[in-house]
Image: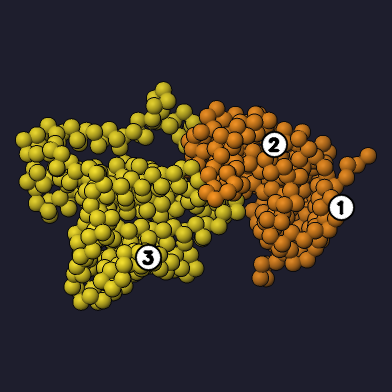
Chain colours: A orange, B yellow
């Protein structure tokens, strides 16, 4: 039996002036599924995800969340619904430590009058979040910019997950990471899935997409060029779908 | 491999003891020892001289606390010097007509109003604070010269001069008490409260702070207002200490305050908030100044020396955030 969809984006259109960024895009995300979103630069991946996370508005189309149509008019609404986007440029403060970043904007404080920070509680909570996700940060008291790129990415993911999201969107989570660290971040991504979170991952690195996703959406010139089950495709096919025009593919097939 | 991605490369952690965190205190101690030795016959160590250093640095320290907050949020306020003068003059003019309380309120209101306007230009008009506040500096300085035609306003109210920096509380000058109060409040606000956290987040990564739901505009605006009020307090303290208000008050202070804040270990790019460091930085500058005088250097040479110290401090301070 097919798992139910946590998210459906239907007939999404978006233009910036005369430039058609998205044309009739349909996406389905099932419960506990990871989908990869691939495509050349300016294929519309980020635009689509910004619409989902409330940063942009679609010109046309509708979004269904758990079967109900929703209007995601701003990022706050997306967050409230349980959609967390982890941005490529990391939404972390480099000068603050791990607990401060995990709790940024929702600090635990003493209630009346002067709002003192309850640092101890946030530190303990941080340790348990990191442990739950098996995130390897030995000294959470360090400033974020003293951590490695992978650890920073892990903290950003940890922050997103601590909001108990239903959907996590990752925009190039492995860009600018050392090879060892890419593995760790991908492992972490798979662990999120075990925690019942559905994930959309945008990446230029097909290896990463193949490693974690269940299905792969290929975007091209703002349209969905193909949707493939990972098990039924390979990198070569995806690359062709990403870069070759439809008639070129036809021609190639005819020659074979 | 990229050194940024190497977590072991902190370069400062030696078995948990971070030399960098204590460098400022060691520098102060070092300078003190050097002066104590070389100036031992010129009265450096006398109680009167040491008290004098404290007294001369107190007002700078107070403003350095406020400035640390502003710089921590990633902004500058260059108008503080002239705010000191205008508040002092307004306060003194009021004092000739009314009591202490309304005069103090009026003076602080001047600072708050200037801070409000600074905040407006930075937050609403999206002007760089560097430019907005330097423009304000000129306007306020002109006002301060104008309202009294460059005349000093004498203050004959003994209670006022006692409270604001002229008196002693037992053996302790009231200036110390003010400095201590501002420093302790500043330190607690920066380190222990939600407000301090918001300030640091704003200065660390304004986009991240905003995405996390922090109203960074409000944070900055409030900081400009607080900074203005602190500059007003400084103006009142100058007035109390010198029994008069003059349009020249605070005119040379900006340079020293920035130096103190940076020497204290704060990054001019925002995101650091070392209140105690700023006060120690101010003490170091005061001590060096005092030492240079005792060594027989001229005022001009002292100014040059202070400039060199800022350059060294900036060179050693936390680097610019990587893009």
Tell me the residue at 67%/40% (across/down). Answer: A162
x then y, percent, for residue B199: 48, 51
Q: Residue B145: x and y, percent?
A: 23, 73
Which residue does the numbered mark 1 point to in the structure image? A67
Judge if badges 3 and 2 mark residues of a common chain: no
Tag 2 or tag 1, which sits nearer the N-term?
Answer: 1
Question: Is B108 left, or right, of A56 in this rendering?
Answer: left
**Of residues B246 and A137, the one drawn nearer to the viewer in this rendering:** B246
Q: Is residue B24 above or below residue A134?
A: below
Residue B165, percent across and down? 25, 54
**Chain of the residue under the numbered disc 1 shown in the image:** A
Mark seen at residue A189:
2
Q: Secondary structure at mark 1?
A: loop
Question: Is A105 in front, or is A81?
Answer: A105
State the separation of the CA atoms marked 3 and 1.
Answer: 60 Å
Q: Which is more foreground, mark 3 or mark 1?
A: 3
For residue A43, say whether it is visible.
no
Q: Mark 3 highlights which residue? A: B105
In the displayed structure, does residue A116 sit left or right of residue A154? left
Are both tags, 1 and 2, on one chain? yes
Q: Image point 74% across, 67% down: which residue?
A: A59
> Who's the residue at 9% across and 36% down the image?
B39
Residue B311 position in % (x across, y down): 26, 48
Label 3 secondary element: helix
Task: Name the mark nearer the viewer: 1 or 2.
Answer: 1
Point 35% across, 42% down: residue: B276
């Amino acid at each position: 039996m097919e798992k139910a969809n946590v998210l459906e984006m239907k007939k999404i259109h978006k233009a910036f002036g005369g430039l058609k960024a998205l044309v009739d895009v349909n996406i389905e995300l099932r419960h506990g599924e990871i989908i990869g979103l691939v495509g050349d630069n300016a294929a519309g991946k980020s635009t689509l995800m910004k619409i989902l996370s409330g940063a942009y508005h679609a010109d046309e189309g509708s979004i269904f969340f758990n079967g109900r149509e929703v209007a995601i008019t701003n990022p706050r609404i997306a967050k409230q619904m349980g959609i967390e986007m982890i941005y490529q440029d990391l939404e972390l403060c480099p000068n603050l430590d791990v607990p401060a970043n995990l709790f940024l904007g929702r600090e635990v404080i003493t209630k009346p009058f002067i709002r003192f920070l309850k640092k101890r509680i946030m530190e303990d909570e941080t340790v348990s979040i990191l442990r739950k996700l098996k995130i390897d940060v030995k000294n959470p008291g360090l400033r974020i910019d003293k951590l490695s790129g992978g650890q920073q990415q892990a903290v950003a993911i940890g922050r997103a997950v601590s909001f108990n999201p239903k959907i996590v969107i990752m925009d190039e989570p492995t860009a600018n990471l050392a090879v060892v660290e890419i593995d760790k971040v991908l492992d972490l991504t798979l662990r999120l899935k075990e925690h019942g979170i559905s994930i959309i991952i945008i990446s230029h690195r097909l290896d990463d997409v193949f490693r974690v996703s269940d299905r792969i959406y290929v975007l091209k010139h703002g349209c969905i060029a193909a949707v493939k089950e990972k098990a039924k495709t390979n990198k070569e096919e995806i690359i062709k779908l990403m870069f070759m025009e439809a008639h070129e593919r036809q021609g190639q097939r005819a020659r074979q | 491999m990229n050194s940024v991605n190497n977590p072991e490369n902190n370069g400062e952690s030696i078995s948990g003891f971070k030399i960098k965190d204590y460098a400022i205190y060691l520098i102060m101690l070092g300078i003190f020892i050097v002066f104590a030795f070389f100036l031992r016959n010129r009265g450096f160590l006398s109680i009167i001289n040491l008290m004098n250093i404290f007294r001369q640095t107190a007002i700078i320290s107070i403003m350095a606390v406020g400035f640390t907050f502003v710089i921590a949020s990633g902004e500058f306020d260059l108008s503080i010097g002239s705010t000191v003068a205008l508040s002092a003059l307004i306060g003194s003019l009021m004092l000739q007509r009314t009591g202490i309380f309304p005069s103090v309120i009026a003076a602080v209101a001047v600072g708050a109003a200037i801070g409000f306007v600074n905040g407006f230009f930075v937050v609403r008009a999206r002007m760089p604070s560097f430019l907005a506040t330097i423009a304000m500096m000129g306007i306020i300085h002109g006002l301060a010269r104008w309202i009294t035609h460059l005349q000093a306003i004498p203050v004959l109210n003994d209670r006022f001069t006692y409270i604001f920096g002229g008196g002693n509380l037992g053996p302790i000058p009231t200036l110390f008490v003010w400095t201590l109060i501002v420093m302790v409040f500043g330190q607690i606000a920066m380190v222990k409260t939600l407000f301090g956290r918001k300030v640091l987040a704003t200065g660390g990564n304004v986009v991240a702070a905003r995405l996390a739901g922090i109203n960074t505009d409000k944070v900055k605006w409030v900081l400009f207002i607080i900074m203005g009020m602190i500059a007003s307090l400084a103006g009142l303290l100058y007035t109390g200490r010198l029994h008069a208000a003059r349009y020249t008050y605070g005119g040379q202070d900006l340079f020293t305050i920035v130096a103190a804040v940076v020497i204290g270990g704060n990054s001019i790019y925002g995101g650091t908030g070392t209140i105690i460091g700023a006060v120690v930085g101010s003490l170091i500058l005061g001590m060096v100044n005092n030492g240079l005088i005792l060594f027989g250097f001229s005022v001009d040479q002292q100014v040059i020396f202070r400039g060199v110290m800022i350059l060294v401090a900036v060179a050693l301070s936390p680097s610019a955030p990587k893009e």
